[in-house]
Amino acid sequence: MGILADRLRRKLETFGTPVSVPGKGTHRMLLQDLTASQMAMYLDPAEQSQMTLPGVYAVATADANIVENDTFTVDGRTFTVRKVVRPRLKGEALCRGLLAW
């Protein structure tokens, strides 16, 4: 893992919320409500119409073993990961962006 991904890992360890993913352990993530602009960027209109609001956008470490159809629970609500994005900078995967609802 590169310098930027390591820096993000340290931030997640400090500020991230511990989230348990069944069968995959606990990962620290930054979570936010999925905004309209994020939905437009990552989801096509058909996917948007299938959403159960509110959705969340979560950021986990680049090496987190989280894939589509994994589930996690936050504040008593269970979310299913519908899409995983891998933002890159200078060829380095920085994190896993998870779109879940």
Image: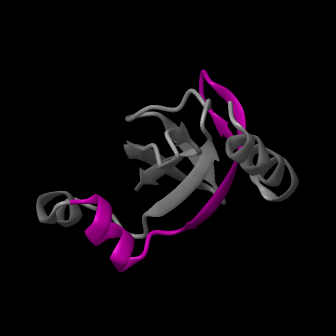
Viewport quadrant of the C terminus = bottom left
Residue at 62%, 30% in the rendered image:
63
Front residue of this view, candidates 75 and 100: 100
Dividing the picture into quadrants, the one containing residue 83 is: top left
Residue 62 vs residue 64, the one in the foreground: 62
Q: Is residue 5 left or right of residue 99?
A: right
Q: Which residue in the rendered view is the most extreme toward the right? A: 14
In the rendering, at what x and y percent does residue 99 appear? 42, 53
Residue 64 on image: x %, y %: 61, 32
Q: How is the image coloured?
A: one colour
Whether residue 72 appears in magenta in the rendering, the answer is: no
56 in relation to 14, above or below: below
Q: Is residue 100 above or below residue 52?
A: above
Determine the residue positioned at 43% across, 52% down.
Answer: 100
What is the x, y in percent for residue 97? 50, 50
Q: Residue furthest front?
A: 90
Which residue lies most toward the top here? 23
Pick the residue in front: 14 or 18: 14
Residue name at image x 54 percent, y 39 percent: 93
> Is residue 38 highlighted in magenta?
yes
Query: Relative to 14, is 53 above or below?
Result: below
Residue occupying image coordinates x 12% and y 60% = 46
- Relative placement, left or right, of 30 versus 77 is right
Q: Which span of residues is magenta-colored?
A: 19-43
The image position of residue 26, as x and y in percent, is: 72, 34
- Vertical order, 30 against 86 (above or below): below
Image quarter where the N terminus lies is top right
